[in-house]
């Protein structure tokens, strides 16, 4: 079963989340630790809280040998380096990146 998850393209495993006051940063960290790429939209979320989320999740993704990539102002991708190299996710990021 784990083999199938590895074979799935990064884009197919990506979760798109509009961050709001009900979003739990620890749930997001758990998803990252399961090697699930995240596209997070902070557009309507509090600026100070957004920065706290980004700093915390940046540390998590760094520990997993990953990166944060800004797609647009307040929209970011958090993923491992392998997932960021995956053509399916790279195509999405390049399409929407400003």
Image (tube, grey):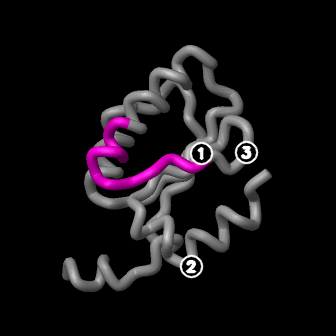
Question: What number is the disc on residue 72?
Answer: 3
Range of residues picked out in magenta: 59-69
Instruction: Give the Cα distance between marks 3 and 2.
Output: 19 Å
- Please tell me whether residue 68 belongs to the stretch shown in magenta: yes
Which residue appears at 39% of the width and 54% of the height?
Answer: 66
**Horizontal and vertical percent for residue 50?**
55, 25
Labels 1 and 2: the sequence-earlier one = 1
Q: Is residue 54 left or right of residue 91?
A: left
Closest to the observer, 78 or 43: 78
Q: CA distance from mark 1 to mark 2?
A: 17 Å
The answer to whether 13 appears left or right of 45 in the picture is left
Badge 1 density bin: few <14, some 14–19, many ≥20, Cα 10 Å: many
Q: Quadrant location of residue 20?
A: top right
From the image, which quarter does the N terminus lie in? Answer: bottom left
Q: Position of residue 26 (x, y in %)?
A: 31, 34
As drawn, the label of residue 91 is none
Residue drawn at the location 33% of the way across and 51% of the way down = 31
What residue lies at 79% left-to-right and 51% top-to-bottom? 98
Q: Which residue is mark 2?
A: 87
Q: Nearer the viewer, residue 4 or 72?
A: 72
Q: Position of residue 4 (x, y in %)?
A: 29, 84
Q: Residue furthest right?
A: 98
> Which numbered disc covers residue 76?
1
Residue 38 higher or lower than 20, as above or below? below
Q: Residue furthest left?
A: 1
């Amino acid at each position: 079963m784990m083999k199938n998850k590895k074979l799935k393209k990064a884009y197919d495993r990506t979760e798109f989340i509009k961050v709001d006051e009900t979003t739990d940063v620890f749930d997001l960290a758990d998803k990252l630790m399961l090697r699930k790429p995240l596209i997070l939209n902070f557009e309507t979320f509090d600026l100070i809280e957004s920065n706290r989320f980004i700093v915390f999740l940046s540390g998590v993704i760094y520990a997993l040998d990953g990166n944060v990539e800004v797609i647009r102002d307040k929209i970011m991708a958090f993923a491992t380096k392998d997932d960021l190299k995956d053509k399916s996710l790279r195509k999405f990021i390049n399409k929407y990146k400003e």
